[in-house]
Amino acid sequence: MPVPAMRDSAPGAVVPLPAGARTYEELAARLADLRRRSGVTYRELHRRVVRLRRESGRADVPAFNTVYRCLQPGRRRLDDELVADVARALLPGPDGAAAADEWRRTCRVVAGLAAESAWARTTIGLPAGDVAVVGRRTELEAATGLSESDLTGPVVIAVDGMPGVGKTAFAVHAAHLLLRGVLRGAVPLFADLRGGGGDRVPAEPSAVLAGFLRGMGASPRPGIGRRRTADLAGQLRHAAPGRPLLLLLDDAGSADQVLPLVPDRPGTVVLVTSRTRLTGLRPGLVVRLGPLAPGASVELLRHEIGAGRVDTDLPAAAAIARLCGHLPLALTVHARQVRERQGWSLYDHHRRAAAAGVDDEVGAAIGASCALLPETSAALLRLVAWCPGPVFDVPAAAALAGVAQESAADAVHDLVRRNLVLDIGAGRFTLHELVRDHARATSWEADPATARQEALRRLTDHHARA
């Protein structure tokens, strides 16, 4: 597991840092990396921890296996005092005490995150399906066009797209259509997986499964350790015999979060939304949502604020749609503001939107996705946002970022997988305008002006040689 945060502790030395770890397993991996870099054996580490505790007058001396397991993969719990002592034993210099405090604090943060991940919002039933879904006829027909012959096993429909593109509204609408059609009489299950980043901690699959079972009137049988998820999945597989299941799993972060939730039983349909392309899931159908067509954007405004107001000033409505980047989230946010200011004309709203820029809700959604990027992808995104034209290729991205083409290709494909870069074919890529604006704003904070100037100089030299 990579250790993204390091600092110098001595000339030529780097020390893994705990800050930023979000799970016990990640924290244990960083602690194990600290031991490897220090060159201290497990036996010597145990002796140092014992000596530290005895010198401080503590009677609770850990066994060798306790110290050893603290640094192993698969950790689901860690003692913060033991973590601090291990760090102190591995960093015996003058900064060791401060480092130990940092490891202790991080372990306590992870403990809070673990407690939050053990809770999941699940319901028996679907969210209300009254949200407008326009301009998605082809995608809806694909997602809801299942027949009885398709339901011999579980069917997974993965819905992905960039932040704000309307994935949840689409999936909810499709789920309601399925319940009125081929899945009439099915048990509908909904869960918010909280995998999209930001301040939300992803829900543990075991918490989701337990929530489903409780909602269906079953008593989840507690499993032990890693068997708990498998045991709960087995219970769900046999729940509600004779009835199909419809699972709507919203905001998945990875295939690993989804796979344990897919019951291996006939008559099951699982609708999954995600900001990333879920590799490893092998869905029966992938629905990739993009920004709306201009006409559909105006139609969404008609639905949200009334045809009368829109049709009296179609140019202003079209201009608002362009400023929103034809994203349903941005359009609905602006429509809400129009409804709240009845005395304003659409032209007034357009001028306000042009001056204010992207709304907080849209910016937060894009920012949450960008916050999950590895540094190589984040740095490349910030610099390709300054590309003078709307389209770039991998060689141009490599020139802007100042990296080898192979590294640039890896980063670009990672950004495509996360739906932050759009692949328009023939080896060419582009950014949605709102993603470009966010990346440029981030670049002003993260990159010195000289770095942007050097990036554009490298791009000019690249084009001169091409």
Image (spheres, helix red, strand yellow):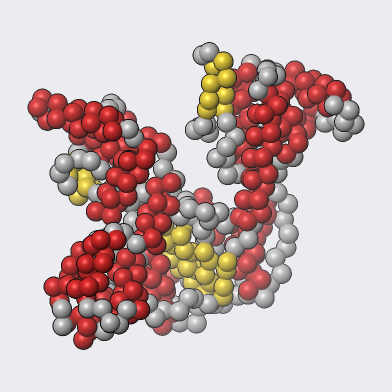
Q: Viewed as shown, does residue 465 lie left or right of 251?
A: left
Residue 26 in which image quadrant: top right
The correct choice, above or below, for 400 with respect to 435 in the image is above
> x, y (%) of residue 451?
29, 30
184 and 135: which is toward the camera: 135
**Can the viewer see residue 313 in this picture?**
yes
> x, y (%) of residue 8?
53, 21
Q: Residue at x 28, y 55 (%)?
A: 434
Residue 358 in which image quadrant: bottom left
**Can the viewer see residue 139 in this picture?**
no
The correct choice, above or below, for 32 with respect to 253 in the image is above
Quadrant containing the C terminus is: top left
Residue 305 in which image quadrant: bottom left
Q: Which residue is drawn at 73% across and 59% down?
A: 222
> x, y (%) of residue 346?
22, 76
285 and 313: which is toward the camera: 313
446 and 77: which is toward the camera: 446
Q: Residue at x 60, y 68 (%)?
A: 212
Q: Residue at x 74, y 40 (%)?
A: 79
> x, y (%) of residue 390?
17, 47
The correct choice, above or below, for 202 with respect to 71 in the image is below
Extreme-bottom residue of the structure: 308
